[in-house]
Every structure is written in structure tokens, then in C-alpha cells.
Image: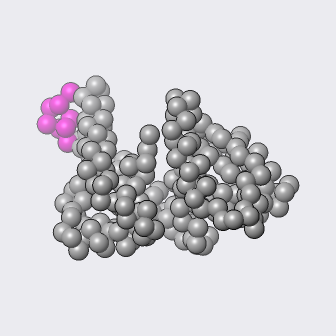
Amino acid sequence: MTDYVAYLRVSTSKQYRSGLGLAAQRSTIGSFLSDGDVIIAEFVEARSGTKTDRKELWKALAAAKRHSADLVIAKLDRFSRRVSFISRIMDEGVRLVVADMPTATDFQLHIFAALAQEERRLVSERTRAALAEAKRQGVVLGRNGSVLAAQHRADADKFARDLAPTIKPLLKLGMSYSAIARELNLAGVQTARGGQFHSQTVKNLAVRIDAP
């Protein structure tokens, strides 16, 4: 029997108004709770994950300290992908619980955050490289650059949708990201770039599938 303070985050005011992203996070947290567990307070924030000035988060932390409760979030990427930020929050003395990976230790949360942070860096590098190559070939950037970035996002979203019927049932069975990656590799399924799946690859797909 544990008391929790829930923290939910969406990136934009539009997502906040639609409520879809918040509903998915509440559902994830609700599925995690055991009999007797109580959400004593909920704090919701519409703020980019790259921003660290989170007024509602600090309110949530204060409430958790006041009531000797744990801070629960739905998914780590809904919280932050910055290792330094997650470390800072952990140093506040409030236990952080991630509903979709409830057995993860603080060390593992740092690892997952580091992987997500590195992937964001690699995506940024690949995008810059693609734009530089387009410019070298004489493509006029600006609007075309935005179109190229949008196309990359659209391709990634389509790939996630195509795999959703395969991945969703496995997630509902409680399979880990690494186990799902192993099954996909054994089945001969390739990533969008023709490579093998890893746990972080599956996690990113799951995020895209659940995104509103």
C-alpha cells in the first residue's frame, strides 16, 4: 500500500486541450497501481521535454515530500530524456517510479535516459548530415529542409503504425522491450533502416504508437 503523487506531461497546449496524451498516461499509471495504492495528488504540465523549468513538477515534488509519497510517471520519455535532469530530480530525495517499467532501479533509469539522449543526438546529426548533403547537391534549403524533416517524421510514424499490430499485443502480454526486439529479429523483421532491433528501438516505436 503506497501513496503516490502523479506527474503527467504533454509537449504542447494543443495536446493538453485534446486530453488524449494525458488519458494514455493516466491509463498506464492506473494499470500499474496495486490494491490499496492511492494517488493523493496529480499535477499536469504542458511543457516541452527539453525544458527544465517545470512549475508543476516542482509542485509535485513538494507534495510528495510533504506526504512522504513516491512520484509516479507513466513513461520515462514523458518526463525527460536528459540524464542530468533526471539525476537532479532523483537527488531531491523523492523516489521516482516509472509505471511502464516499475522494477527499474535508479541505475537502470539513468541508462534508459542516456540511451534516449544519445538517440536524440544521433537523429539530430543524421538530419544535419542529410540537409548538408542536399545543399551540396544544389537543393535550396529553407522550406525544403522543413519538408525533408517532416518527411522523415512521417516515414517513422508510418513504420510504427505498420508494426503496431505486432508490437501492441506483445506489450499487453507484459513482454520487455528487449524480449520483443529478440522476437522481431528472430522473425526476420528489420528496422526502418534495414538493421536489427534493440530494446531502445522497440521503446521508441512504442512511444510513436502511443503518441496522440
Q: Which of the two residues, 34 or 150, is positioned nearer the viewer here?
A: 34
Task: Quadrant for the C terminus, please.
Answer: top left
Please give left or right for residue 74 compared with residue 182 in the image: right
Measured as percent of width and height from the top left, residue 182 is found at 31, 73
Splitting the image into 4 quarters, where does residue 189 fall?
bottom left
Q: Which of the two residues, 55 or 122, is positioned nearer the viewer here?
A: 55
Q: Which of the two residues, 140 or 66, is positioned nearer the viewer here?
A: 66
Q: Which of the two residues, 10 or 180, is positioned nearer the viewer here?
A: 180
As drawn, the residue found furthest toward the right would be 66
As drawn, the residue found furthest toward the left would be 137
Measured as percent of width and height from the top left, residue 194 is found at 19, 60
Q: What stretch of residues is rendered in magenta?
A: 133-141
Splitting the image into 4 quarters, where does residue 104 fall?
bottom right
Measured as percent of width and height from the top left, residue 121 is found at 41, 53
As drawn, the residue found furthest toward the front would be 35
Residue 143 shows in the view: yes
Task: Quadrant for the N terminus, please.
Answer: bottom right
Establish if 99 lies above or below 105: above
Splitting the image into 4 quarters, where does residue 185 fall?
bottom left
| Residue at point 54%, 66% (across, down) | 101
Q: Is residue 138 magenta?
A: yes
Please give left or right for residue 75 compared with residue 206 in the image: right
Measured as percent of width and height from the top left, residue 103 is found at 58, 72
Residue 94 shows in the view: no
